[in-house]
Amino acid sequence: MSDADAVDTDLYQRAQALLEPGEIELVGVIVHTDLSGDQEPTLHEATLEIGNHIAEHAGIEPTDTYVYSGNDDGEFGVNQHQGLTLDGDEFVWECQQLLREGTFDVVFYYEADIDQEGLVEALRESGYDAVGVESQA
């Protein structure tokens, strides 16, 4: 948990628990922002940019994806979004935007076959406070 030393341990552990076994193996990233609740348009732009980084590192052109926000799905939470492919609605990433202590932390999940180190580094180079999350298994 070396990268997580700089982040909220509880948030890291909760994100890590969500990676546990499912149909596909997942990893994730926590992105801390200084964006407050009244800056949701900027948060939206950041979510799209981070999603594009994830798509690129998964070998998918960002222009071949779209964001589904689940407005028509009762099982989707507020501030929960998915990046899906235009061709076939295949899963690329999912995120939850969490307002914590006045600013947003965004937790993204995606398939584990991605270049996790490269993605986290690219996010940091783009100015994001990003910490990779790996499964405990």
Image: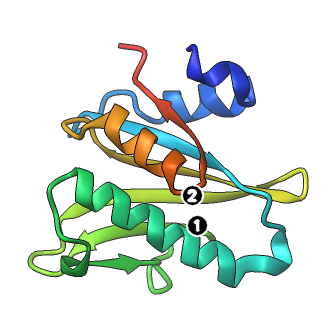
The picture places residue 101, in percent across and down from the top left corner, at: 90, 50
- The amino acid marked with disc number 2 is Gln
Q: Secondary structure at mark 1?
A: loop
Residue found 60% across the figure and 52% down from its top: 128
Is 132 located above or below residue 30 in the figure? above
Mark 2, residue position: 96
Point out which mark residue 77 bears: 1
Frontmost residue, 105 versus 73: 105
Horizontal arrangement in the rendering, residue 135 relative to residue 106 (left or right): left
Q: Is residue 90 left or right of residue 28?
A: left
Relative height, residue 5 to residue 80 (above, below) = above
| Residue with the most extreme right position | 101
What residue occupies the far front of the structure in this picture? Answer: 125
Provide the secondary structure element on which disc 2 rests.
Answer: strand
Residues packed near mark 2 inside 10 Å, few (<14), some (14 to 19) or many (20 plus):
some
Q: Are marks 1 and 2 in contact (CB under 8 Å)?
A: yes
Residue 61, quarter of the rendered image: bottom left
